[in-house]
Image (cartoon, rainbow, N blue to C red):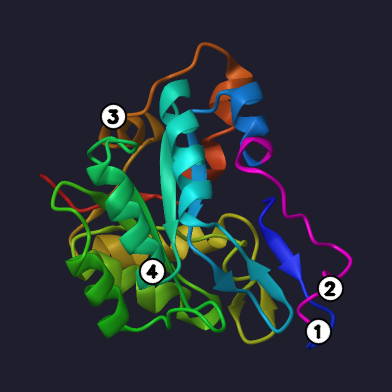
Amino acid sequence: MGGGVIFNDADLSRFGDGTDLVSAQERIAHVEELLPEICSLDCGAVCLGEQLVQIYTTETVRKMAECIRRLGVKPEIEVFDFGGLTITNQLIREGLIDDPAWFQLCLGIPYSTPATTHTMKALVDLLPRASLWSAFGLSRMEMPMVAQAMLLGGHVRVGLEDNLYLGKGVPATNGQPVERAIKIIVGLGGRPVSAPEARVKLGLTVRGTHARLCSCLPHLYRVPALPSED
């Protein structure tokens, strides 16, 4: 958070109530305080609906990435479009994000990259060769994108942040999307992994307190599977 600008009308000279545009340092203050194993790093600007624009300039992302690296925290790079991926690739070349980088491809958000086979593959084709990645699709495209990510050799993310329903008018509980995703994964020849395995795969720095470990679990349970190596 910290990058949202809300416009109440077409007058772009005035920010609306709820705008939380702050400096790069303020946006990662909680990372410095909590020192989680992993934290989100959004890249680029994206329209999130009719009035909200999330703004991360190249220099803002650069400063955030530099601080996150210094703290020894693994960035989960959230990519919403091709421009954000271009920014990230530049920061990797500058040495501000360590290899292997961890990407989250965010698909199906209105006015951003659609959740389709073609767009996911196009984004994957532009990732650095050594990268690790997962992807998700918003709303009804959640499970189709689970299957697509597996077919392209990636990992998956599901959860109530992306889709509140199991079907039309049927609310989901917290664990149901994970259970459904695992069925798809196993059916395609993959397997779920434990949190310790995921930590090794992602190269996380394990922290020494329960509170710090727990701060990362929402990310890890939404990455429930990896291609089978058995």
Residue 78: x and y in percent read 45, 56
**Mark closer to the observer (4, 1):** 1
Image quadrant containing the C terminus: top left
Which amino acid does the dot numbered 3 rest on? Val
Residue at which label 3 appears: 200
The foreground one among 8 and 13 is 13
Residue 196 in magenta stretch = no
Residue 213 percent across, percent down from the top left? 54, 24
Q: Secondary structure at mark 3?
A: helix
- The answer to whether residue 65 of the structure is visible from this angle is yes
Assign the magenta stretch its main secondary structure.
Answer: loop
Q: Residue at x 57, y 67 (%)?
A: 162
Q: Which one is earlier in the sequence, the residue at label 4 or at label 2?
A: 2
Of the numbered discs 4 and 3, the one sitting upstream in the chain is 4
Q: Which mark is residue 198?
A: none
Q: Which residues are the magenta region?
A: 11-26
Q: Position of residue 19 (x, y in %)?
A: 80, 61
Task: Specify few, some or many for label 1: CA neighbours under 10 Å numbering under 14, 14-19, or 20 or more.
Answer: few
- The residue at 52%/74% (across/down) is 138
Q: What's the amino acid at mark 2?
A: Arg
* The quarter of the displayed image where residue 15 is located: bottom right
- Residue for badge 4: 83
Against 70, residue 53 (above or below) is below
* Residue at mark 2: 14
Extreme residue in the left direction: 230
Asked which secondary structure carries label 1, the reply is loop
Assess whether mark 2 and mark 1 are in contact (beta carbons under 8 angstroms).
Answer: yes
Residue identifier under label 1: 11
